[in-house]
Image (cartoon, coloured by chain):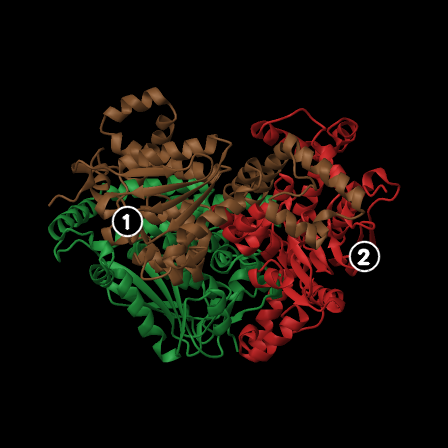
Chain colours: A red, B green, C brown
Amino acid sequence: MDTSRSSSQSAGNITVEGNAGVLVARLDGGPHAVFDPEMSKQLKELVDRADRDPDIHAVVFTGTHPDRFLSHSDVRWLQKGGTGFPPINTGLAKLVARSARLINRVPVVRTLAGMTRLKTLLQLDSFHATFLKMNASGTIFVAALNGSALAVGAELAFACDLRIMADGEYVIGLTEALLALTPGGGGSQRLPRLIGTQQTLLAVLEGRPFTSAEALSLGAVDEVVPKEKVLARSIERAEYLSLRSKKSLGAIKRSIYFGSSLSLEDGLQFEHAEFLVRDQSKEAQGRMLEYIAATEATGELPLLNRETYARALAAGRIGGSSSE
Amino acid sequence: MDTSRSSSQSAGNITVEGNAGVLVARLDGGPHAVFDPEMSKQLKELVDRADRDPDIHAVVFTGTHPDRFLSHSDVRWLQKGGTGFPPINTGLAKLVARSARLINRVPVVRTLAGMTRLKTLLQLDSFHATFLKMNASGTIFVAALNGSALAVGAELAFACDLRIMADGEYVIGLTEALLALTPGGGGSQRLPRLIGTQQTLLAVLEGRPFTSAEALSLGAVDEVVPKEKVLARSIERAEYLSLRSKKSLGAIKRSIYFGSSLSLEDGLQFEHAEFLVRDQSKEAQGRMLEYIAATEATGELPLLNRETYARALAAGRIGGSSSE
Amino acid sequence: MDTSRSSSQSAGNITVEGNAGVLVARLDGGPHAVFDPEMSKQLKELVDRADRDPDIHAVVFTGTHPDRFLSHSDVRWLQKGGTGFPPINTGLAKLVARSARLINRVPVVRTLAGMTRLKTLLQLDSFHATFLKMNASGTIFVAALNGSALAVGAELAFACDLRIMADGEYVIGLTEALLALTPGGGGSQRLPRLIGTQQTLLAVLEGRPFTSAEALSLGAVDEVVPKEKVLARSIERAEYLSLRSKKSLGAIKRSIYFGSSLSLEDGLQFEHAEFLVRDQSKEAQGRMLEYIAATEATGELPLLNRETYARALAAGRIGGSSSE
């Protein structure tokens, strides 16, 4: 029985429900729920579209497999990727990784390069870039973890802004050490930012995943709910955040994900630049004028009034009027 | 009724008590407790003085408003700041931010530029630099949070070394998303360093502040005490830290705030340089010689003797003699 | 009574048990359990050997003193180090630190420089480089904290991958502020990565160490066990991790310690390069092929089968066969 996706007819597929507001993206990695080049390609297209379209505010990912979000990569893909170029050392690998990134930015070169033995390498780099775009985007990405997620399955979840996981005998984590590998989809970079360096180090050295309960207590997921409520709760949280200005959410995400990973001084400048762009936007200018008008009309600052503030959180905006 | 500070006669004011040891700085932002250009200017002068004067060891900030530390910025100031220059994109904004920083360093250019439409922009950058100087200084800054602190009010508190907050229905946090903005006073950079990236992300995307209890449990403040004890407890902690060498405290603050935000390798070099400067200082040389003498006189290492150590913590120094 | 190590006949010594698998290194700093130039030299030799030798998988450090892991440095060494060069400011110190690093990389220059007054400075820089090599190595380093560890004693423990501490009246921490110094062996850089910036700041500004219980609750140590079990438990955990591929452990340690201290974008590229090198290794290629074969033979992914996974964790590898 041939269970490798790359040599079978079927390939990974992402079914998208909705075309505005909150989209639901169902990850179908076949009977084994694996992540393969076709799913990587569809993921890139979805993220590009969701980032670009001002009417798409959030994407909720979930798995079609009864017990899994995504098992891990198609191992045949990873294995072939390791034979696609001559043996290299770490120094050379850094150059290759840098080139791959540059090549991916030039469509024509990408097509040519894609025909060579660098193809698999470029595919691997391409999903790296997709995860990074998720972090830079004003679109909110939520992982509705209906079951287990190992290796790249966990890494996709860690690249989301929010993780809601099913209660039960499910696990999430980085297993690469057991295959004499090391994480390659951002896991060793994003997990420390969620749960700290030391807890990441111990788990990744062991190749040990977390149960839902452990993941919650460490901060690797944000909520654990009964399995049948995972999707609904994920949509609910996505809708709540979606009421905020998409451009504002993007600026906040970039300031926190990118800015706060820089030196303090550079991070402050990064944040300041994002602030200046927002401050002169028509959207923020309008809200600030409304805020000033509401302050003058009521004699108090709306954000310092508990009821007004609570209404603003529910509406995703303050300003006093319902129009924009 | 005109409640905007910028168009009213009154302006923000900081009253400073004491002129050596631990100063108490009372932030008076008028009836609305807002942060405006005049308060920003006085804050800069105070921080410059406290940093420079070897006899000033700590500054405790508190609000004069009965229920607020600082509400947030004067919104008219922010709003006008967004109209002071042509619409820009993020790339350009980075250049502007960098220029503003450079211009602020050259007094003559600053005066000229201050007359142009860049005035507000330069004011915003100037309080950024003030917060950074607080992090670099051997002076200890404590936020005695007598009430709520939103946006720049929270950001000033996050730029302090210690935060003591009143128990009760007060909140602290970053509300910019509700105005279609993004934090601009360092909040998106300093809060992740206090409570982690993910808790910061969720709160800032929502525009949701923390209650005192939440802030304490997350680590956004260091202590929560009854309101009437906030100032006294803040002074007490400031006095305890003030017994240590001011130059040593500065080196420690820079190593942790700046060094530990660099790559591990650069951070280690940063720390090493700070260590070398301290190691050759007259002050440290004197204490090391005393330590060696005390070791030889007693036959044991003073830091490894529990009683001697407890006395050293209370005195802020070890060495065995009371003179220096 | 002369208790300074540098002027006495005896000098620090490290006794190493075993020559493959898990080594036990006993730190003997004499009656005062201090870290001196001779111990620094032996530590460097041990770390170099353990890193280089593919048959050495872990090193467990413990102290020979009944109540101490390591007290702190020989203070005479630090004090003399501060007199070995003309008074310098922070800017110059950075250059000196950088030069020291470069000089240490060129053996001949090192010998010449070692004869000059820079000798002590170079020794200090040399143990910095040793700690960094521990972080970069595929060898696992464990601190079996049989007792207290202050200053460089704590810094050596923080440079290890795992810390097991004795229950009881022992302390671990950074005491430099009390001598008007600042940490110089990486403590201000590695402790924030273990317990966060704010908890580090408060403790280091005070010069206050943590008890075993506090250290555990903050995350400064990983386990606290009865004193008589510290060494056995440390060896047990070292043996468990040692079953994994040494090269894989090295890639994971570098990705987490170094990669995750870079900007998010640079960290992802760092990780990716480490992944590419592992992916094309004979070792990982073999395991992936075994994994694919096992998947095809059993019809299921071994990592998604709970029993197979549990066995893989115990064996340190997945793949289905016991040979390699």
Residue A163 appears in the figure: yes
C207 relative to A46 in the view: left or right: left
Q: Nearer the viewer, residue C158 or B242?
A: C158
Residue position for label 1: C65
Q: Amino acid at mark 2?
A: Thr
**Other residues around mark 2 within 10 Å, as few (<14) / some (14–19) / many (≥20):** many
Where is residue C19 shown, x and y percent of the image?
Answer: 43, 34
Total label count? 2
Q: Chain of mark 1?
A: C
Q: In the figure, residue B176 lies in which quadrant?
A: bottom right
Tell which residue pokes out farthest to the right in this image: A9
Q: Position of residue A100 (x, y in %)?
A: 67, 32
Mark 1: amino acid: His
Residue visible at 74% across and 55% down in the picture: A69
**Residue B92 or C66: which is nearer the viewer?**
C66
The residue identified by callout 2 is A64
Residue B194 point in image, percent of width and height: 47, 59
Secondary element at tag 1: loop
Q: Which image quadrant is residue B13 in?
A: bottom left
Identified at 64% across, 29% down, the residue is A96
Indicate left or right for C189 with A193 as reference: left
Callout 1 crowding tier (Cα within 10 Å): few <14, some 14–19, many ≥20 = many
